[in-house]
Amino acid sequence: MGKPKDLSMFWMPPVDGVEVLHAHFRQHQYPRHTHEAATVALMDSGAASFFYRGETHTAAANDVFLINPGEVHTGWLAHPEGYRYRVLYLGAGALEQFHDEEPGKKGQGSRPLTFRETLVRDDRLASLLDRTHNALKPDNDGGLLQGELLAELAKVLYERYTEPVPAGAETVRRDGNRAVSVAREYLESRLAEKVSLTELAGVVCVSPFRLSRLFNAELGMPPHAFQNLLRVKRARQLLADGARAVTIAREVGFYDQAHLNRVFKRYTGVTPHQFKVGARGQR
């Protein structure tokens, strides 16, 4: 008997800034990674563990876990049968369009959601997420219902689980250590090139060992993992624009399409083809 297969489905509903993932993972493990969007995940069955903000959390059926944009986390099986979950990825402004009270008053610009809690057990929120996911399914054309449920979700999240972003917090995070900042820019400008740690350290004039430590301290991952994230991010953009995976692989620095497929799925939970099909649904 072969190993049990992972099942996953990704799509972008016709709502600005919202992406959806439904998955039953029985093997998949997420490496250290980040999302540009806020993560709101509803556990349906089984259990999953993840390392986030210096702690290991374990989410079981009917739990909801909340992860801030740009913050490093992992994910692995915590039950013999794996776990089933449904995820909303909410970009900056995704919920503000349905909720014009603090912290997203109109005219102030879009700010990412910032959660003050990680793992919550809230039957009202779980039920609301279940109804929202059902309304967002690709075969459901209930635009009014989708908006109503997202408005209610915005109200619950803002009132119960978010906190305002301190003025200047994002600027401080973006500036960080100068060596890391320069190294990031170097990697971003050379996605398709093979960059060694020695070369990268030489660019910023520190030792390879020190640069690796600085990356881990500031970004929560070593340079090679950050490079993979950059490549996956660019691959997502190209796939959403309709490019073919076979041409994307070399353009973003992978050896071939098989390499792209492996890394892309590790970081996103879906294959490039699944992502492309799901992204196409929004157009």
Image (tube, rainbow, N blue to C red):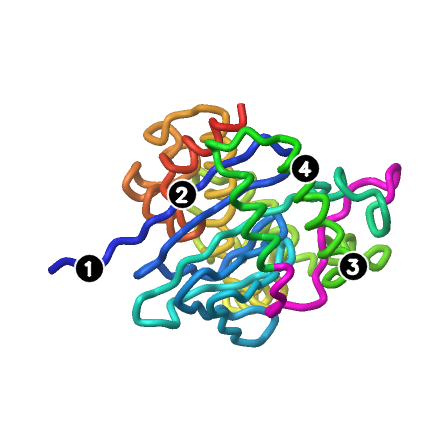
Q: Residue flagged by tag 1: what amino acid is it? A: Lys
Point 49% across, 68% down: residue: 50
Mark closer to the observer (3, 1): 3
Residue 227 shown left or right of residue 108 in the figure:
left
Mark closer to the observer (3, 2): 3
Q: Crowding at label 3, few (<14), some or many (≥20) Cα neighbours within 10 Å? A: few
**Mark 2 and mark 3 in contact (Cβ < 8 Å)?**
no
Q: Crowding at label 1, few (<14), some or many (≥20) Cα neighbours within 10 Å? A: few
Label 3, label 2: how far apart the Cα atoms are? 30 Å
Label 3, label 4: how far apart the Cα atoms are? 18 Å
Q: Which label belongs to residue 159?
A: 3
Taking depth in this image into account, of 126 and 273 the one nearest to the observer is 126
Mark closer to the observer (4, 1): 4
Q: Position of residue 130 (x, y in %)?
A: 54, 52
Q: Position of residue 137 (x, y in %)?
A: 49, 38
Q: Quadrant of the N terminus?
A: bottom left
Q: Which label belongs to residue 3?
A: 1
